[in-house]
Amino acid sequence: MSDSFTAAQLAARFPADFIWGAATAAAQIEGSVAADGRTPSIWDTFAARPGAVAGGDTPSTADDHYRLWAGDVRIMKEIGLDAYRFSVSWPRIVPEADGRIESRGLDFYERLVDGLLAADIDPFLTLYHWDLPEWQQQRGGWPSRDTAYRFAEFAGAVVERLGDRVRSWTTLNEPFIFTFLGHLEGIHAPGVRDESAAVSAMHHALLGHGLAMSALRAALPADAQVGIALSMTPAEAATDSASDQAAAERYSLYRNWLYLHPIMRGEYHPATAELFTTAPSVQKGDLEIISEPIDFVGINYYARGVVTHDDAIAVTRARLEEPVGEYTAMGWEVHAPGLESIITETHLRYGPAAIYVTENGSAWNDEVGADGSINDERRVAYLGGHLEAAARARAAGAPLAGYFAWSLLDNFEWAEGYAKRFGLVHVDYDTQRRTMKRSGAFYRQVITAMKR
């Protein structure tokens, strides 16, 4: 079956108003970490720690998007994207603890937004994608309640400048990752391993989300949409045993519902206390702030979790198994049905008004051919399979409104450095040359087929 035929088949399964996008994050692509008044983020600090990031890589240059953004917008236009999901660097906007707003940072995002609009690409702006200013980390970071209020102030500064042009806003990206991988497992910035700190970070991230929601609502027009993007991993029990089934429930709560439940229900999930030895410090009015109504839930999906009961595993008492199958360069199982499953389950459990797949993609050991081409067949297959899964979820009644491929560009992949490539577009980090991969061309075919 030819790519064009496959692309046309996929396109036919989505409505004409479906949003086709791609996503990036500021810390992963911008570089220029000291330009125009920007100060370090916790990821600059973490990456400087020996052994913290593979290969000793740092985000100091990354894709040099801060200088090369206009060319990247042209690439988006070439692919045919309806929307581009990007994040704003907090330390680029608020570089010091005194709260001073750096206009040069806002000027950059204003140029980017205007460039996107001129190319007929809708900006989907994410306020926080893990790059907490180092100055705020020194004041306690997310385990400190103060961070939630500083985040809301940052949100207010960004929406004041861009709210007249940006209609789609995301408060936080994957709070599970920056709270628990950053404060419990210690493998992401800031590299802390403390359950009490992680639980406090969880609550203050939720509070920050709610406070930012209020700031955005006060400034945005009625037709704007605001939501949150959550990393989700559908859990399956490895066997039919009662212990494995219970382990799957615990793992699912940990990975999927800790954040969404209080946002949608105004209370912590009743089983939260079964996971942790400490409880979040909830003050009067917190849950009302946290449960400010949202317009959409963003789902970031990469793999499922197949689990067995294991009391030796902290928090979840669930050990991840490795089913026989295909695995990406990240060691993540390729399992497209999991995307359909988590979209459908989110819809049935909480009934959000709209759902976006805000991230979905795969890393492979891409090889550049003698002619300079990148024939990433496995990424093409991954993309096609997951789009089919998304279409099935829509057909089952889920209000899926759009899909954002991760990622537009190869980039700084956090603790994995530059060794892992997720992009639809290859980046030569020595020359900063961009080359469309076959997956990018395939995605363009799907979008083009939609618009015929």
Image (cartoon, rainbow, N blue to C red):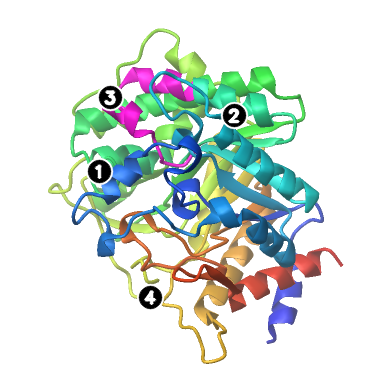
Magenta span includes 136: yes
Residue at which label 1 appears: 316
Select label 1 or label 2 by which is in front. Answer: 2
Q: Of the residues under marks 2 and 3, which one precedes in the sequence?
A: 3
Helix, strand or loop at mark 2: helix
- Residues packed near mark 3 inside 10 Å, few (<14), some (14 to 19) or many (20 plus): some
Residue shown at 61% from the left, 48% from the top: 85
The answer to whether residue 253 is visible is no
Residue at which label 3 appears: 140
Three-letter code, disc 1: Thr
Three-letter code, disc 4: Gly
Label 3 and label 1: CA atoms lie apart by 26 Å
Q: Of the residues under marks 3 and 4, which one precedes in the sequence?
A: 3
Label 1 and label 4: CA atoms lie apart by 24 Å
Residue 72 position by quadrant? bottom right
- Residues packed near mark 2 inside 10 Å, few (<14), some (14 to 19) or many (20 plus): many
Magenta span includes 320: no
Residue at which label 2 appears: 158
Question: Where 34 sits versus 323, above or below?
Answer: above
Helix, strand or loop at mark 3: loop
Select label 3 or label 1 by which is in front. Answer: 3
Residue at which label 4 appears: 325
Label 3 and label 4: CA atoms lie apart by 42 Å
Query: Where's the C terminus, which quadrant?
Result: bottom right
Residue shown at 66% from the left, 61% from the top: 71
Q: Seen in the image, is 204 located left or right of residue 360?
A: left
Q: In the displayed image of the protein, which residue is found farthest to the top?
A: 284
Three-letter code, disc 3: Gly
Q: Of the residues under marks 2 and 4, which one precedes in the sequence?
A: 2
Label 2 and label 4: CA atoms lie apart by 44 Å
